[in-house]
Image: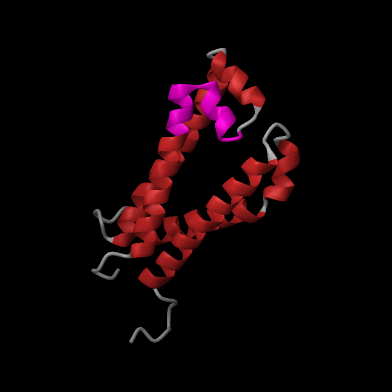
Amino acid sequence: MQSTSNKYLLAAAICCFAAAIAHLGCIVFGGDWYRFFGAGEQMARMAEQSLWYPTIVTSFIVLVLLVCTLYGLSGAGAIKPLPLTKLALILIASIFLIRGVSFVGLMPMFPENSLTFWVISSGICLCIGGLFAVGSWQQWPVLGANNA
């Protein structure tokens, strides 16, 4: 790993952290936040009724985003290396990029989510995935490539 900080991985980590905070806000502030972020009226109503489902699902997303944050920071050299950092960053980049381009196929499974939600969240996923991909590529150039 290079000794200098990787700006792309740092940016990806910051984006993941911001997304985790936004999701945490949905848990804390309830239905209005779910509605604002386009999660659908059903999720908003369940949150207002203090049902467990929105909190569990959103907490899982927060946890995943925080793990992505830590791996982004690790890959950038901002914190100590985490186990399997290269593999984790490749998987994280792939998942974000796949999520970004597969929204058309996902939309029928979540009919309550607005088109605005799908377009914006998919764009965000593509950006974050791109940051992870470019940052990882810069940090660990392709094997056999000239590193000069």
Residue located at (60% from left, 18% from top): 46
Q: Residue 53: x and y, percent? A: 56, 22
Across and down, in percent, residue 93 comes to 50, 58
From this view, report whether residue 50 is shown above or below residue 86. Answer: above
Whether residue 102 sits left or right of residue 31 in the image: it is: right
Q: Residue 95: in sight, yes or no?
A: no
Q: Residue drawn at (64%, 48%), measured in percent from left and top?
A: 119
| Residue at the farthest right position | 108
Q: Quadrant of the N terminus?
A: bottom left
Any magenta on residue 125?
no
Q: Nearer the viewer, residue 119 or 77?
A: 119
Q: Magenta segment, principal secondary structure?
A: helix
Image point 47% across, 34% down: which residue?
23
Reply above or below: 27 against 81. above
Q: Is residue 60 left or right of residue 7?
A: right
Q: Is residue 27 part of the magenta span, yes or no?
A: yes
Left or right, residue 29 beside residue 77: right
Q: Residue furthest top?
A: 49
The picture places residue 68, in percent across and down from the top left corner, at: 41, 48
Residue 13 in view: yes
Residue stretch in magenta:
23-38
Residue at 54 percent across and 52 percent down: it is 125
Label total for image: 0
Residue 147: where, in percent of width, then height? 35, 83
- Identify which residue, 84 or 111, lies in the foreground: 111
- Quadrant occupied by the C terminus: bottom left
Considering depth in this image, is 57 or 107 the residue closer to the camera? 107
